[in-house]
Amino acid sequence: MRRKSPRKFTDKFKKDAVNLVVEKGYTVAQAATAYNISTKLLYAWRKKQAEQP
């Protein structure tokens, strides 16, 4: 059985997902479900975006 390769996400996709939480008021769980990603991944993207100037 072959391992699945990790999914790759564009910067725009990441920004759009984070903006649902930051600007639209979604919970992380709601946004993660909407984009079919894990909450852990979305938390990491949100943290990374917050650290950028």
Image (tube, rainbow, N blue to C red):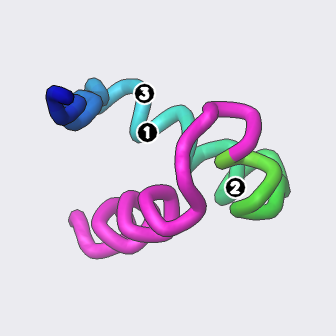
Circle 2 residues within 10 Å: few <14, some 14–19, many ≥20? some
Q: Residue at x 29, y 67 (%)?
A: 48
Q: Which mark is residue 32?
A: none
Estimate the x, y position of residue 28 in percent, counting from the top left: 70, 62
Q: Could you tell me which secondary element the residue under label 1 belongs to?
A: helix
**Could you tell me which quadrant the C terminus lies in?**
bottom left
Q: Which mark is residue 21?
A: 2
Q: Could you tell me which secondary element the residue under label 3 belongs to?
A: helix
Residue that label 3 marks: 13
Estimate the x, y position of residue 26 in percent, counting from the top left: 82, 54
Frontmost residue, 20 versus 5: 5
Estimate the x, y position of residue 14 in percent, counting from the top left: 40, 39
Frontmost residue, 32 versus 1: 1
**Would you place residue 31 above or below residue 22 in this image?**
above
Marks 1 and 3 sit apart, C-alpha to C-alpha, by 5 Å
Horizontal arrangement in the rendering, residue 28 relative to residue 8 (left or right): right
State the extent of the magenta-drawn residues as a range. 33-53
Q: Marks 3 and 2: CB-CB under 8 Å? A: no
Frontmost residue, 19 versus 41: 41
Q: Amino acid at mark 2?
A: Val
Label 2 or label 1, whichever comes before in sequence order = 1
Residue that label 1 marks: 15
**Could you tell me which quadrant the N terminus lies in?**
top left
**Would you place residue 9 above or below residue 41 in this image?**
above
Q: Amino acid at mark 1?
A: Lys
Label 3 or label 2, whichever comes before in sequence order = 3
Q: Residue at x 75, y 59 (%)?
A: 29
Does 47 lie within the magenta span? yes
Circle 3 residues within 10 Å: few <14, some 14–19, many ≥20? few
Horizontal arrangement in the rendering, residue 5 relative to residue 17 (left or right): left
Find residue 22 and report its image quarter: bottom right
